[in-house]
Image: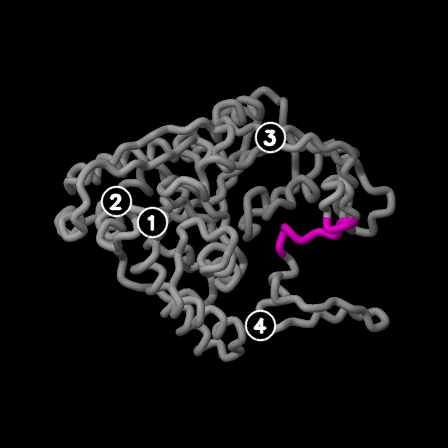
């Protein structure tokens, strides 16, 4: 949003002036982070105005949010009188809350238990493919990851197919060290990077690095992250890489580990466009540049592609950017996850393949209803 210079009105029209062209502006304005709030939400996070079917009544950050039906809502959604959103970070506790009837829907069902949960009485598991991905992120400006050969050793030292099979259990697809997959209409496929212990050994030896490499993880970083880290540790061992895995507490992971520590597990829900994904996480000046990726050619291509209206030219620019990021950056992306959610059979109105994020692109609480 930094490119927005001025917003004004002209009758019923809103005029947005940019400092540079952006072909994706209409998509950006739909981002879930952008809500209408007095003072930009800085004074009172619970004071959102919005135009939706619910009004926020109570907020305890990190614990719960309560919303009540908006009596002035104009649409045909919002079927419950009250919605309560409860934060349950522990996977086992979250599933148990659904099974016991404490909650009516949950996101992030652990893939390794999803089929078992689906067989439980009164519960239905839903799986939706999309741009979400589970990742291992290295700070490319911090030793030993500032050495490209160390990064390449780790990229060749991971067995992506094994991870998809054993961690996702069929709820996802293999990744290729890129944050973009075929869900994007301008995606360009490249040769799949395979697990190759010999190449991993070659790059490790070339790097000159000796000793262990520390990877931090937690269940809260993505479902099955500790198991994925253990598999990574095993595959690295076969390539002569001493990977030490440290399991961090769930609480505080996003404030103390992610975007702070130089090597950790994480996830991205993906974004509607390549420009938004790259601008959010891989532009050198991005606040959420969690791999500390800094490549002048990549930045130039990103800005040029953003202004390009020719789809063919833009697609090629994104292909070039993808290769730069894949080969030079600190991202290891072994898998694209399906969004695995579950609902109680008390509810109705679920829509399959609602693209975007979990829980019907976050709309299930307002579009579903309790059966009569």
315 relative position to 229: left or right: right
The tag earlier along the polypeptide, 4 or 1, is 4
Q: Point out the stretch of residues depicted in magenta.
A: 31-40
- Within 10 Å of the Cα at label 1, are there few (<14), some (14-19), or many (20+) other Cα atoms? many
Q: Position of residue 372 (x, y in %)?
A: 74, 31
| Residue 113 image point, x, y percent | 42, 29
Q: Are marks 1 and 2 in contact (CB under 8 Å)?
A: yes
Q: Is residue 335 above or below residue 63?
A: below
Sequence-wise first label, 4 or 3: 4
**Residue 158: mark:** 2
Name the foreground residue: 258 vs 193: 258
| Residue drawn at point x = 63 percent, y = 51 percent | 32
Tell me the residue at 27%/46% (across/down): 144
Image quarter of residue 5 = bottom right
Residue at (63, 27) in percent of width and height = 103
**Which residue does the numbered mark 4 point to in the structure image?**
23
In the displayed structure, does residue 107 sit left or right of residue 161?
Answer: right
Circle 4 residues within 10 Å: few <14, some 14–19, many ≥20: few
Q: Which residue is mark 1?
A: 332
Mark 4 and mark 3: Cα distance apart in space: 36 Å
Residue at 39% x, 32% y is 112
**Residue that carries the numbered disc 3 in the rendered image:** 87
Figure check: 208 above or below 58? below
Structural distance between the alpha carbons of marks 3 and 2? 32 Å
Q: Earlier in the sequence, mark 3 or mark 2?
A: 3
Q: Is residue 345 visible?
A: no
Say which of 272 and 232 sits in front: 232
Q: How many badges with numbers are in the image?
A: 4
């Amino acid at each position: 949003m930094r490119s927005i210079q001025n917003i004004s009105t002209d009758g019923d029209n809103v005029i947005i002036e940019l400092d540079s062209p952006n072909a994706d502006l209409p998509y950006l304005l739909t981002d879930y982070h952008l809500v209408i709030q007095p003072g930009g939400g800085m004074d009172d996070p619970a004071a959102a105005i919005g135009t939706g079917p619910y009004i926020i009544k109570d907020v305890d950050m990190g614990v719960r949010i309560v919303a009540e039906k908006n009596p002035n809502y104009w649409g045909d959604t919002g079927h419950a009188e009250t919605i309560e959103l409860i934060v349950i970070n522990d996977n086992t506790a979250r599933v148990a809350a659904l099974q016991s009837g404490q909650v009516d829907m949950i996101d992030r069902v652990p893939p390794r238990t999803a089929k078992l949960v689906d067989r439980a009485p009164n519960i239905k598991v839903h799986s939706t493919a999309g741009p979400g991905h589970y990742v291992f992120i290295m700070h490319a400006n911090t030793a030993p990851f500032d050495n490209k050969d160390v990064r390449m050793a780790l990229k060749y030292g991971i067995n992506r197919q094994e991870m998809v099979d054993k961690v996702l259990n069929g709820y996802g697809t293999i990744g290729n060290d890129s944050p973009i997959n075929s869900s994007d209409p301008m995606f360009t496929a490249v040769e799949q990077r395979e697990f190759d212990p010999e190449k991993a050994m070659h790059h490790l030896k070339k790097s000159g690095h000796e000793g262990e490499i520390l990877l931090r993880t937690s269940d809260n970083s993505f479902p099955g992250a500790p198991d994925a880290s253990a598999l990574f540790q095993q595959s690295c061992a076969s390539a002569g890489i001493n990977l030490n895995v440290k399991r961090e507490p769930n609480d505080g992971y996003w404030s103390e580990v992610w975007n702070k520590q130089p090597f950790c597990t994480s996830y991205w829900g993906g974004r509607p466009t390549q420009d938004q994904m790259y601008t959010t996480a891989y532009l050198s000046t991005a606040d959420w540049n969690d791999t500390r990726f800094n490549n002048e050619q990549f930045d130039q291509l990103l800005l040029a592609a953003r202004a390009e209206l020719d789809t063919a030219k833009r697609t090629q620019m994104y292909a070039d950017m993808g290769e730069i990021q894949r080969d030079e950056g600190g991202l290891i992306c072994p898998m694209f996850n399906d969004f695995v959610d579950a609902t109680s059979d008390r509810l109705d109105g679920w829509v399959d393949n609602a693209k975007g994020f979990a829980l019907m692109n976050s709309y299930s609480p307002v579009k579903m209803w309790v059966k009569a």
